[in-house]
Image (cartoon, rainbow, N blue to C red):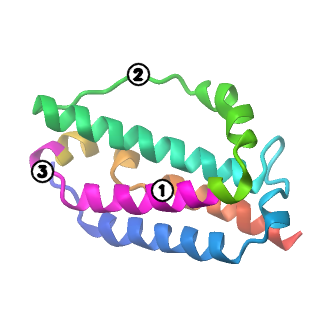
Amino acid sequence: MVVDKSYVERNRASSSRMRALAERLSDEDLRLRCGRNWTVSAALAHLAFWDLRVMHLLDATERNGKLCVAEIDISVNDIALPLWAAIPPREAARIAVETAEALDTRLENFPQSLLEEIYAFNERWVVRALHRNGHLDAVDAAMKR
């Protein structure tokens, strides 16, 4: 399966969106509620966590020369939310932006045949914009309230 290279621009656009948002957020903004139990900073820490998860997947896949998926139950969001919420808000924003940009670069330079395996298994692990933009939309909505 050939990976549509538009993921590169989509990922970069979502990282740029995240950076622009993080730069304009005040410390008070970072503490705003963003969803039922989330804050803006927890949403950003969440994005950093899942981008780091994809980085881990890339490392293992490249090292083994084939797709290596570490199963992570979706309940990890509920388990990790108190930890993400405890991260100082400005630090959560910094980590999210730096991780997104590093992952974008890694994905762009990842071996094509391995990237195709990953994409076929889970498109969202390659097109990170699909995950990021949903949360960034929620943050934007919280900012408008």
Helix, strand or loop at mark 2? loop
Q: x, y (%) of residue 88? A: 72, 50
Sequence order check, earlier mark of 3 and 1: 3
Q: Which amino acid, by three-letter code, is at mark 3?
A: Pro
Q: Of marks 2 and 1, which one's residue comes earlier in the chain?
A: 2
The residue positioned 29% from the left and 62% from the top of the image is 105
Magenta stretch, main secondary structure class: helix
Q: CA distance from mark 3 to mark 1?
A: 21 Å
Residue 131, horizontal then vertical, whole percent: 51, 52
Nearer the observer: mark 2 or 1; the answer is 2
* Dot 3 or dot 2, earlier in sequence: 2
SS assignment at label 3: loop
Q: Position of residue 13 (x, y in %)?
A: 45, 73
Q: Residue furthest right?
A: 145
Q: Label 1 amino acid?
A: Leu
Mark 1 nearby-residue class (10 Å; few <14, some 14–19, many ≥20): some
Residue at x 23%, y 31% (from the top left corner):
60
Amino acid type at circle 2 is: Glu
CA distance for labels 3 and 2: 22 Å
In screen coordinates, is 36 left or right of 116? right
Q: Which residue is mark 3?
A: 111
Residue at the spot of label 1? 130
- Residue under label 2: 71
Residue placed most toward the observer, 71 or 45: 45
The quadrant where residue 27 appears: bottom right
